[in-house]
Amino acid sequence: MRERRNLRAARWVWLATGVLVVASGTAAFGLFRGETGGQLNGLAWSILIAAAAIATTGLFTVPTTSGNRLTPAYIVVTALPLVAEREIVDEKLIGAIPFFGLESALAAVLGGLAVLAVLRAIRGDDAREIVERFVRRLVVFVAYLLAYEGLSTTEFLLGSEWRRLVLFAIAGLGAFAVEVLLHVTFTGRLLGGRTRHGVASSASDAAVFVSLLATGALFGLSFETIGAWALAVAVLPYAFTAGAFRRLAQTKRTYEQTLVALAQIPEAGGHTPVGHAARTNDLATAVAERIGVSPKEYERINYASFLHDIGRITLNEPSILRQGFTDVDLAGWGAEIVGETEYLDEVATIVRRQHEPFRSPGEVSNPDLPLASRIIKVCSAYDESIYEMGFSPLEALERIHRGTVYDFDPDVVRELREVLERRGMLNHPVAVTPE
């Protein structure tokens, strides 16, 4: 039954994709005919080339820290309203005439996105992803073009050499705001703290977005002076910048994979349940996202939740077993291991303090206890209750609730419950047999 529903849903998604492609292509053709009169003149070829450039560059993505997938197609769209030809009267330069009007630019965008959707379908991309990308790109691109067109009809900085650059900067800023809003919307982070986290995370992509828009602006503004050479002038700096972003993303992935491998050492030694670090990380990052932590704090929680039990590898030492130990000792030894890497100093602090109680008798709370440590303490205890003690999800959560008197942060426990309920994990209270 579920497979049948999934198949039916997939058909509807593909139908929506087809409708979007046909509607976009039809609109593009109508605008194209209106602008060119159906003739293959210079403007017609320019629109076709721009549409082809949008379609081909849209197949590639630029890595970002938030996971948002920006595309070099922004370069092409940014340049469209900026490309101009010199206006010379009596051998005197009196200004520049924009090469693309709003209608011709929209024709290139709509046509390019329609072809891009077809190319992505041929490539085998998921239909839902095709629809999402199509809608997001269409809204952002059209917003940028409309903003620039609206500003260009005003007398703002009229006659100034900086006019086009300033108009581009304002329209680009608006386009980035729309991009952030759409990314938060399509990733389902529109409620509570998730909105704060989503906006902050997406805003961290500003450097990538600015590099794309700046490349387009460089091409558009230099075209009237050096013609086709503007392509090389714009693309070469961008190629180096994009390469740097890719190397940074690859380094970060390698770093995280190393941490994941280290987190599995205590599990391989039988000191923690298999998968405990990954499950704790999954819950801790979900709770952190709901609370609305900053991207930097989210990164620290991501790392610390993987490494929070790394101190248990010391249990392989016979001297440690003879002397005895506590959870606080294990956390301290784990913090020493993590702290060997200077970059992880703050992560080491989180690991060291993860077993401290939320409050002591007579206190409202411990204001010095990091939020990250409180989150990891709650999520780790929940996973241990299931996979070590054999509790059902409801029983494990009830145990955590009882611990809010002193041990656990009530606000973190409430957010954990929201995460579990949204995932449907509390609807099937089946106990797990400890290994």
Image (cartoon, grey):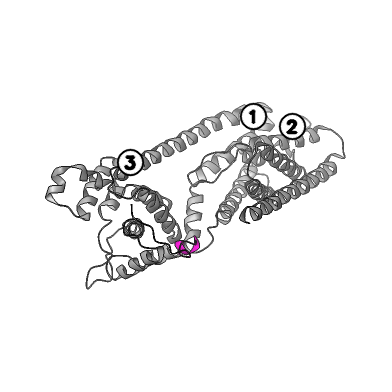
Which residue matches tag 2?
Answer: 92
Closer to the chain start, of discs 3 and 2, is 2
Q: Which residue is mark 3?
A: 262
Q: Quadrant of the N terminus?
A: bottom right
Residue type of the residue flagged with mark 1:
Ala
Question: Position of 202 compared to 271: left or right?
Answer: right
Please say if 102 is above or below 195: above
Percent coordinates x, y for residue 153 in the rendering: 72, 51
Element under label 3? helix
Amino acid type at mark 3: Leu
For marks 3 and 1 on the same chain, the one whose residue lies earlier in the sequence:
1
Give the amino acid type for the residue marked by disc 2 in the picture.
Lys
Residue tagged 1: 230
In the image, is 163 to the left or to the right of 262?
Answer: right
Among the 4 quarters of the image, the one containing residue 317: top left
Image quadrant assignment for residue 402: bottom left
CA gap, disc 2 and disc 1: 23 Å
Are dots 3 and 2 in contact, CB under 8 Å? no
Residue 415 is inside the magenta segment:
no
